[in-house]
Image: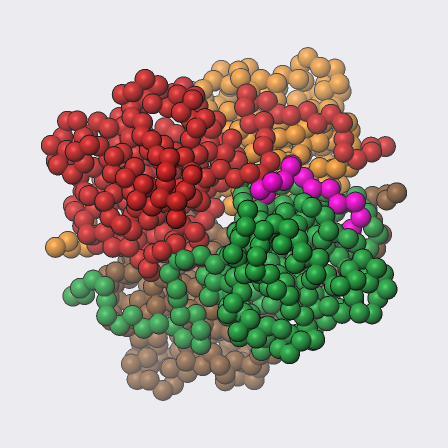
Chain colours: A orange, B brown, C green, D red
Amino acid sequence: MSSSIRVTVWNEFQHEKSHQAVIDVYPDGIHKVIADGFKTHGFENVRTATLDQPEHGLTEEVLAQTDVLTWWGHMAHGKVDDAIVERVHERVLQGMGLVVLHSGHHSKIFKKLMGTSCSLLWREAGENERIWVIEPGHPIADGLGPYIDIPAVEMYGEHFDIPAPDTLVFISWFKGGEVFRSGCCYHRGRGKVFYFRPGHETHPIYYQAEVQQVLANAARWAAPGKGPEFAYSGGRAINAKVPLEKLD
Amino acid sequence: MSSSIRVTVWNEFQHEKSHQAVIDVYPDGIHKVIADGFKTHGFENVRTATLDQPEHGLTEEVLAQTDVLTWWGHMAHGKVDDAIVERVHERVLQGMGLVVLHSGHHSKIFKKLMGTSCSLLWREAGENERIWVIEPGHPIADGLGPYIDIPAVEMYGEHFDIPAPDTLVFISWFKGGEVFRSGCCYHRGRGKVFYFRPGHETHPIYYQAEVQQVLANAARWAAPGKGPEFAYSGGRAINAKVPLEKLD
Amino acid sequence: MSSSIRVTVWNEFQHEKSHQAVIDVYPDGIHKVIADGFKTHGFENVRTATLDQPEHGLTEEVLAQTDVLTWWGHMAHGKVDDAIVERVHERVLQGMGLVVLHSGHHSKIFKKLMGTSCSLLWREAGENERIWVIEPGHPIADGLGPYIDIPAVEMYGEHFDIPAPDTLVFISWFKGGEVFRSGCCYHRGRGKVFYFRPGHETHPIYYQAEVQQVLANAARWAAPGKGPEFAYSGGRAINAKVPLEKLD
Amino acid sequence: MSSSIRVTVWNEFQHEKSHQAVIDVYPDGIHKVIADGFKTHGFENVRTATLDQPEHGLTEEVLAQTDVLTWWGHMAHGKVDDAIVERVHERVLQGMGLVVLHSGHHSKIFKKLMGTSCSLLWREAGENERIWVIEPGHPIADGLGPYIDIPAVEMYGEHFDIPAPDTLVFISWFKGGEVFRSGCCYHRGRGKVFYFRPGHETHPIYYQAEVQQVLANAARWAAPGKGPEFAYSGGRAINAKVPLEKLD
C-alpha cells in the first residue's frame, strides 16, 4: 500500500559516530534503518534530519513539508535548541504527527508535550521483551499477532511518568520482572502523538519486521487530519466578540 | 475519494409507513437518505436493511459482508429480536464497525454494548442545535469547521447515561439551555462504535451536507482493522496452558 | 481509620463445599476472609451473602443497605438469577459501588456492565505475579509500594476483552510471559466499578496484607457519591418539556 | 465536615489594586473570598499567597506545607517567575493537588502541565452560563443538582486546547451559543490537577454557594494520596540494575 504521507525521520546521530558497538549495528545511523522501513511499507516521501545539521535539519521549510516526524535521541537531548523544540511543538499543535521512539521519552519535545517528567526505570541486561496488543481494533495494531517478541532489549519499567494515554495500544513484559506501557496514543492540539518503546542503539530492533510494521501504522494514524484549524500560535485566546445567538 | 468499505444502513422503517409528517420528509425511508449520503461520499458498497425483513435483514450472510453497520430505530426497539442483537454484538466484538444514530441510543444493541441505561433528557420544540468540534485532529472531524449548525431539532440533554467515551469528538449546544455529548467513540472488543446524536424522523437532518460528511468519516474510522483476532465467541476464556517463558 | 461504609461481600460459595483443596485454604468460604480483611481495615458494617441463600442473599432490602458490593464467582456464574443481576445492575447505576474480583470477570453482572465478552487467557501453573502501580496518585494505590508480589497464582493474560478503563491503576506481570490490566476503574451511571484481578480459590491470596489494603481502598473509592440523582430506571428518557431558556 | 487538608489559595492580586470595578466586587482580593469559602466548608488550614510577595508567597517551606494549591491569575501570567513555576510543577508531580481557576488556563503552570496552548474562545458580554454535571458519581459533583446556573459570566468557548481530561465532570452552556469543558480532572505524576472554569474578576462568582461547594470537593479530591513515591526530580531515569527475576 503506497502512501504519500511525508515522513521526516529525526535522529540525534551521535552514538553512531563514536561508539563502535553502535556503528556495528547501525553503520549509517539509526535514521537510515527507520527510513528504509518506511520505504518498505510504501512511503514515497521519506527524508531524514539530524542534530548536527543547521537548525538540526528541522527548518521551517522542512517542517512545513512534514506530515509525520519521528524522533530518536538519547545522549544529546540537552543539545537540542529550545527554539527548535518550540517550532516542533507549534507544528504538532497545528496538526503534524509525532512518533517518539524509545529513549526519546526524555527528549525536550516529548516532555514539553506531556507536561510530566517522563521518567522511568531502566536496565541494560539484554533480556527479552514481549509487547502485548491491548487494543486489537486500533489501526496501530494492524498486521500484528497477539504480541511481538523482541529477543534482546534494554528494559524500561513502570512507573512511567506520563499522562494516561488517550489510547493504550501495547503493554510490554520483560524477563526481569517489569511491565511498561509501550504504545501510547495522544491527541495534542490538532496533532497526534505516539510513543513507541522499542529500539536501542546497540540492538538491531529497527530491522525487525513487526517494529517496522508498527512504525508504518503509527505514521498512517498520526498523519494530519482535515478537521477545523485553530489559532494555536502566539498564546492569545480568541475574542469571539459577536455571539452566535442573540443575547438579551 | 472512493471507498470499498461495505456499509449496511439499518432502519426500523416504521414511522415512515404510518406518520404523514415523517413520510413528507423521508418518503422512501430514513435509510434511503443515509445510504445516498454514503454514495455521495464515494462508498461503492452500500446496502440497507429494515426491521420487517426476515431476520430484520441482518442475516449471518449480510453481517459477514458488512464492514460498518449504521443503526436507526425509535418506536420499535422492543421488536428487535434478541437473537439478532446477540449476532450483531458478536460481530462488533469481532471487528465490525457500528454507528448508532440519534434515538438509537435506546436500542438494545447500544445498551448492550454500553452496559448502562443510555437514558437522557429530550424535548421536541424545534429549537436549534450547534455541534462543536472538541477533538479537531480526530478523523471524524475531517472536513468540518469549528461547529455544525442544525436549524431545528429534537433536543437531547445531559445527563446522558453512557460510559465516558474513549474519545469525545463533539459536544452539542441547544437553544433551550442544554448540552450533550453528541459524538462518542468507543473501542469494544476488536470493533469500534460511534454514537452520533443528530437525526430525527421529522427533521430533514440526514440531507444536511455536514451530517453526511460525519457519517462518511465515521464509517471510515469504524471500518474493521487488521489487528490480531481473538476468540470472543462462546463465552469461554482461553487456556494458555503452555507458558511462553520457562517456569521453575 | 474506621469507616461507616456498608460493604456486602458476595461469594458464590460452591468450591468451598465440594473441593478439599479449596476447603483447606478457605474453610469458612472466601467471603469470610474478604470480610475479615475489611474489618481489619476499620469497616464497621460488613455483611456477607452467598448464592444458595434466598435471592442469593441480595434482596432489595440488603442492596438498599449496601454502599459497596464485592463479587466473587467462578463455577456457578450461570446459576445467578437474571432478575438479581438486573437488580444489582440497577443499583450500580443508582450509585452503589461494585468491586469485581478475579474470576468474577465472567460473571453476568460484570459482562452486563462492560458490554463485552470479558474473556481472557488463563493458566493454572502456580507461577508468580507482580502487580505494578501505574497511577501512583490514585486512592486505590494508597499504602502500597511500587508493586505487589504474589508468590503463586493462576495467570490471567491479555487480550482482556474489556472497555478501556476510565483509570488503569495496576498492570500485572506473570512469570510465564503475560501481562494483564489488573486494576480497572469505571464510572457507570452514578456508580463506580473496580475490577481487581488477584484471588483464586486454591491460593491464599485474600489473606495477603496488600490485597486486603487494595480492597479497603477500592471500597472507599467506590462508595456512593452525593452527586445529582438521575431517573435511570424503567428505560424511559425524561421529557424536559419546559426549556430552561426562552425559545423563539 | 471538617478537614485537615492544607490549602494555599494563590492569587496574582493585581486587578483588585487597580480596577475599581474589581475592587467593588473583591475589595480584599479574590483570594480572600476563595479562602473564606474553604473555611465555610470546614477546611481548618487555609492560607493565601500572592504575586507581589517574596517568591510569590510560594517558598519551598510554604509548598512543603501545602496539600492543595488553587491558582487564579489573569493579567500578570508573564510576571510569574519561571523558577517558581518549576517548583510548583515539581511539587505537583510529587503529589500536591492543583486547582486551576478560570483565566488560570493561560498560566505558565497550567500550560506546562498540559503541554498544549490551553487557548480558547472568550467574550465579555455578561451572558448566563449553565454548568451541567456529566459524571454524577464523581466526588467533585457531590452536593450538586443536575446543573449550576451562573447569572452573568465571561464566556469561554471551545475549542479549548487541552489534553482530553482523564475525567470530564462538567460541561458549560452559554447563552451566546458556545459550550465548554469546564470541569477537567487530570493525574500528572503522583499529583492531581483540576481545572474549573467559573470565576472572573468583575463577577461575584466565588461568592456563589455551588461554586464554593465545587472548590471544596475539588480540594478533597486533589489532596495527596498515599501511593508509592517516585524519584521525579532531576530528570534522571532510575537504573533498576538488579532484576526482580532471574535472567538467563
Task: Answer above or below: position of C182 versus C109.
Answer: above
Residue A91: where, in percent of width, then height?
A: 42, 32
Q: Which residues are magenta?
A: C141-155
Q: Nearer the viewer, residue A15 or A49?
A: A15
Task: Answer above or below: position of B71 versus B191.
Answer: below
Q: Please give the count of numbered marks on the rendered protein.
A: 0
Residue B111: where, in percent of width, then height?
A: 51, 69
Q: Is residue C32 left or right of residue D221?
A: right
- The residue drawn where x is 86% and y is 64% is C20
Q: Is residue C131 magenta?
A: no
Residue D236, quarter of the rendered image: top right
Residue D229, quarter of the rendered image: top right
Quick one: quadrant of the C terminus of chain A? Answer: bottom left
Q: Is residue A36 left or right of residue B115?
A: right
Residue C51: where, in percent of width, then height?
A: 68, 73
Residue D13, quarter of the rendered image: top left
Specify the farthest residue to the bottom. B18
Magenta part mainly helix, strand or loop? Answer: strand
Task: Answer above or below: position of A125 versus B8.
Answer: above
Q: Nearer the viewer, residue A85 or C223?
A: C223
- The residue drawn where x is 56% and y is 64% is C113
Q: Nearer the viewer, residue C238 or A29?
A: C238
In this view of the protein, can residue B170 be seen by the observer?
A: no
Q: Is residue C150 magenta?
A: yes
- The residue drawn where x is 59% and y is 43% is C141
In this view of the protein, can residue A125 be seen by the observer?
A: yes
- The residue drawn where x is 44% and y is 53% is D138
Residue A176: where, in percent of width, then height?
A: 77, 34
Q: Nearer the viewer, residue B228 or C51?
A: C51
Specify the farthest residue to the right. B248
Q: Is residue A53 left or right of residue C126?
A: left
